[in-house]
Amino acid sequence: MNLISNQFFLKIYSKFFATTVGQDEYGNKYYSDKNNSPTNNYRERRWVIYNGEIEASKVPQRWNAWLHHVIKEKPSSDIRKEKWMKNHLPNSRRKLNLNKEKKYTEKNYQSWNPNND
């Protein structure tokens, strides 16, 4: 199974068996399940369903802390932001590297042959 089909089944599971906790500024939706089982150290399960491309760097720091059980309460959207703080940006290097890989796969050199001295 690929990530897209897993995401599809996770959406169905989330709709019927989970509680919607919130949504961030990127449109990612966060869910929790109160099933306290020993496989999760008797904690609630928390997960995210990405809006668009599945990219882990699209999760803001506040929501990442919630997903990893660093904070117990869901992040509030009305946090005080200092003027020197920048907005969270997802990783854009992945798209840049895809374009560069095409250039490096082309053979733009002549291979050395020891018999041609």
Image (tube, helix red, strand yellow):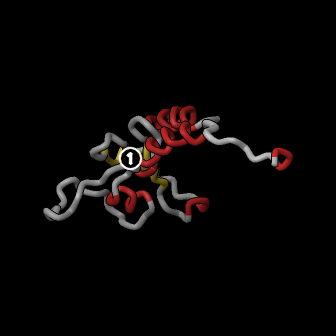
* Residue at the disc numbered 1: 30
Give the residue at x 35% y 56%.
63
Image height check: is 15 above or below 70?
A: above
Q: Residue at x 44, y 37 (%)?
A: 53
- Farthest-out residue, left: 83
**89 sits to left or right of 11:** left
Give the residue at x 52% y 58%: 36
| Kind of residue at badge 1 | Tyr
- The answer to whether 46 is drawn above or below residue 85 in the figure is above
Question: Residue 116: image x %, image y %?
Answer: 82, 44
User: Where is the N terminus found, in terms of image quarters?
Assistant: top right
x%, y% of residue 28? 36, 42
Judge whether 21 appears above or below 62 on screen.
Answer: above
| Identity of the residue drawn at 32% across and 59% down | 62
Residue 23: x and y in percent read 31, 44
Residue farthest to the bottom?
A: 70
Judge from the rendering whether residue 111 lies leftward or rightward of residue 95; answer left or right: right
Specify the farthest residue to the front.
117
Identify which residue, 103 or 66, lies in the foreground: 103
* Residue closer to the observer: 75 or 27: 27
- Disc tally is 1
What percent of the width, then of the height, locates residue 51?
A: 38, 37
Residue found at the very far right of the displayed protein: 115
